[in-house]
């Protein structure tokens, strides 16, 4: 099995350090790992046709039409595609075709009460609950849990299969008038390929949380090319 790790974009999500956390796991599961610092590799048809799993951590940034076409073609043909947080759910904002592929897009992360804000990234750190929606190989045996980090508000379509959700409550300082439920973890079948998105992962400590790490690692194995997609 061959895995392609694509990392880059906004450095605030520490794409190198974050993906490095999972390289030993991939190696231990028998993957031959190739690392690219640019999504331009998606345009290389020979590389993509031999790749069983793509792990992407590229926040914002941009992607060429050729690279995007290569990514979409590979997933349709059975290459798995997975990632976490902004590295997959806030990538390539200008590309509607990428958004269609992934099925969900970061919109915002609501913050603390304004008087409690100090002007740094922790203004957007809230304690919230992750609630699992049912049994799945990625989430089996895990119980609902709490995180203190960015709580992603996600715009999404109905083709995703939601494995976990979170609820954004109504607060006096926010303009919405009823609680909003957002997906936290979802899968998506696209052609012969499997996609897994895990929205927590802003910082290394979140990725090292046992629940998040378990979901990300299981997601890699579940998304990887199956025999039926070979």
Image (spheres, grey):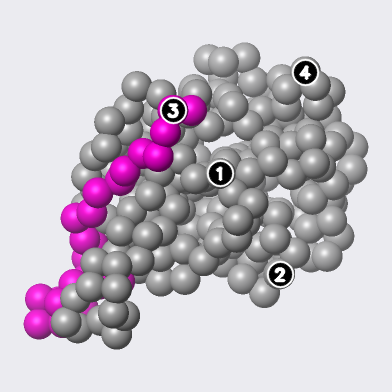
Q: How many marks?
A: 4
Residue denoted by label 4? 227
Q: Where is residue 74 in the image (x, y as percent from the top left)?
A: 81, 42
- Nearer the N terminus, badge 1 or badge 3? 3
**At numbered mark 2, what does the secondary structure look like: helix, strand or loop?**
helix
Residue denoted by label 2? 96
Q: Distance between the residues labelled 3 and 2?
A: 31 Å
Residue denoted by label 1? 161
- Nearer the N terminus, badge 1 or badge 4? 1
Q: Residue at x 61, y 71 (%)?
A: 93
The one of 174 and 225 positioned closer to us in this rendering: 174
The C terminus: image quadrant:
top right
**124 magenta-colored:** yes
> Which of the two marks, 1 or 4, is nearer to us in this view?
1
Q: In this view, does 64 lie to the left or right of 84?
A: right
Q: Give the range drawn in magenta.
A: 110-136
Looking at the image, is 10 positioned above or below residue 101?
below
Q: Which residue is drawn at 72% across and 27% down?
A: 225
Q: Is residue 47 visible?
A: no
Report crowding for label 3: few under 14, some 14 to 19, many 20 or more residues within 10 A (C-alpha).
few
Q: Where is residue 90 in the image (x, y as percent from the top left)?
A: 54, 63
The N terminus: image quadrant:
top right
Q: How far apart are marks 3 and 4 (CA)?
A: 23 Å
- Nearer the N terminus, badge 3 or badge 4? 3
Residue 135 is tagged as 3
Q: Distance between the residues labelled 2 and 4?
A: 30 Å
Report crowding for label 4: few under 14, some 14 to 19, many 20 or more residues within 10 A (C-alpha).
few
Marks 2 and 4 close (CB-CB < 8 Å): no
């Amino acid at each position: 099995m061959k895995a392609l790790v694509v990392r880059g974009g906004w450095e605030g999500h520490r794409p190198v350090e974050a993906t490095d956390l999972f390289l030993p796991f991939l190696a231990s599961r028998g993957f031959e790992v190739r690392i690219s610092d640019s999504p331009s590799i998606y345009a290389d048809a020979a590389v993509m046709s031999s790749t069983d799993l793509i792990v992407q951590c590229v926040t914002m940034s941009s992607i060429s039409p050729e690279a995007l076409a290569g990514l979409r073609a590979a997933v349709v043909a059975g290459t798995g595609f997975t990632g976490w947080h902004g590295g997959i759910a806030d990538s390539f904002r200008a590309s509607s075709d990428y958004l269609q592929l992934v099925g969900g897009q970061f919109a915002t992360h609501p913050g603390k009460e304004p008087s409690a804000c100090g002007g740094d990234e922790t203004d957007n750190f809230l304690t919230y609950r992750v609630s699992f929606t049912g049994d799945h190989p990625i989430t089996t045996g895990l119980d609902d849990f709490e995180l203190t980090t960015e709580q992603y508000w996600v715009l999404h379509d109905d083709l995703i299969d939601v494995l976990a959700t979170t609820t954004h409550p109504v607060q006096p300082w926010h303009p919405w008038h009823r609680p909003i439920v957002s997906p936290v973890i979802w899968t998506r079948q696209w052609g012969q390929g499997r996609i897994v998105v895990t929205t927590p992962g802003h910082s290394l400590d979140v990725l090292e949380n046992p629940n998040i790490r378990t979901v990300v690692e299981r997601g890699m194995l579940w998304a990887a090319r199956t025999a039926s997609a070979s």
